[in-house]
Amino acid sequence: MSTPKTTAERLVEATRELLWERGYVGTSPKAVQQAAGAGQGSMYHHFSGKPDLALAAIRRTAEEMGAAAEAVLGGEGSAYERIEAYLLREREVLRGCPVGRLTMDPEVIAHPELRAPVEEVLDRLRDRLAEVVREGLDSGELRASIDPVEIAATVVATVQGGYVLARATGSRAPFDSAVRGLLSLLATP
Amino acid sequence: MSTPKTTAERLVEATRELLWERGYVGTSPKAVQQAAGAGQGSMYHHFSGKPDLALAAIRRTAEEMGAAAEAVLGGEGSAYERIEAYLLREREVLRGCPVGRLTMDPEVIAHPELRAPVEEVLDRLRDRLAEVVREGLDSGELRASIDPVEIAATVVATVQGGYVLARATGSRAPFDSAVRGLLSLLATP
DNA sequence: GTCTATAGTCGGATAGAC
DNA sequence: GTCTATCCGACTATAGAC
């Protein structure tokens, strides 16, 4: 039932994988072409160049991340349960975050068009988490001494930093530790 | 009173700066030479190549980070105060963490010698923070429902993830939010 | 120790044929 | 749309003179 993928599709998917693994600086058009099984001419027919290709890839990756987060945060359960579900959601921890990773790339940060999707999706995620925390505050589920905006930032930062620790050690253990530590702090009444 | 810097010194310092800004993949020997004011021959006289140079730079950067952390965590004050001091310590937030940044570099992760200093310093930092949390538990300063190892991971992850958020938005605000959020969770009795 | 010369490969793209 | 040819600079060295 799946439509056979177009060349443009394959190029974007290949770019997404390579950006995730090697970043913008470490990803060459030639590597993308090989991974996608497309020739030079083909690539430059569909995209104006590396930045154009990267933009399409980054946009799609950001979109997917936003949708995955919303699926959990907009789901069933109490505020705490939804935050917990977000934190415990399945992740390929050792590969790092395909979006967060881009923030360490100097070229992405230097070019506003490339950075925009990254900034937007992370901002939206924090906003959405702050809403959920606010709900928890209103219902008395979370203690009143915390600030929704701050806690939202702490939650996202814990996840992003968890990736860093996991990759440093080559094991997902510190990611899981960091998340459990945060949950224990949030759970305390 | 400062000894004039040797060429080898200048090469290592230049490499440290470039690794911080552009990562291993994005840093070329030529760029290092220019930043250090050294010629090709000179660089290859002192170092066997890019990996050798990077190793020296990474080791020194990790060492400095370890020392800076210990200065704060081994200082005066209660357990909470020292954790707070660690979290609030001055940082060039928008530049990211010179050590954590390396975990997103595929070449660093792929080469055990390059990854080792990164892993070691982050492991030691977590161990040291866990000790401090344990002290706070023993003294009753922190609540008994938390696990020192987990909280240590949460603290380091919050910092590392804070850098990601700050770079994504181009502002240190989310870093500060994340840290304050974590402190508010830790402070609650 | 430092310099210049040389070399092979890759990066990022353009041109034009099919 | 896709292919091949071509281009020029950058990357990562090695060689040998000074």
Image: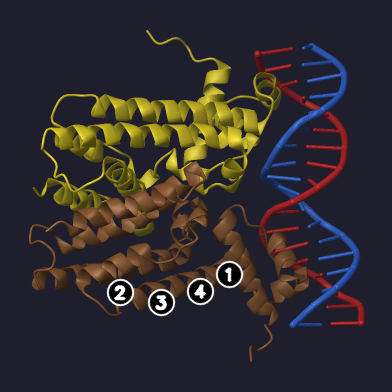
Chain colours: A brown, B yellow, C red, D blue
N-terminal-most mark, 1 or 3: 1
Going by the numbered disc 1, the residue's amino acid type is Asp
Horizontal side of A161 relative to A149 (left or right) equals: right
Going by the numbered disc 3, the residue's amino acid type is Ala
Marks 4 & 1, CB-CB < 8 Å contact: no
Going by the numbered disc 2, the residue's amino acid type is Leu
Is B63 in front, or is D3?
Answer: B63
Residue on which disc 2 sits = A73
Name the mark nearer the viewer: 4 or 1: 4
* Badge 4 density bin: few <14, some 14–19, many ≥20, Cα 10 Å: some
Tell me the SS state at disc 4: helix
In this orientation, does residue A157 appear?
yes
Chain under callout 4: A
The quadrant of the rendering that contains the C terminus of chain A is bottom left
Q: Residue at x 72, y 67 (%)?
A: A33
Tell me the SS state at disc 2: helix
Name the mark nearer the viewer: 1 or 2: 2
Badge number at residue A60? 4
Residue A96 x %, y %: 48, 56
In this orientation, does residue A48 appear?
no
Seen as rendered, the residue at the extreme bottom is A1
Chain under callout 3: A
Q: Are marks 1 and 2 on the same chain?
A: yes
Residue on which disc 1 sits = A52
In three-dimensional space, the C-alpha distance between marks 3 and 4, rounded to whole angstroms, equals 11 Å
N-terminal-most mark, 2 or 4: 4
Q: Are marks 2 and 3 on the same chain?
A: yes
Seen as rendered, the residue at the extreme top is B1
Badge number at residue A67? 3
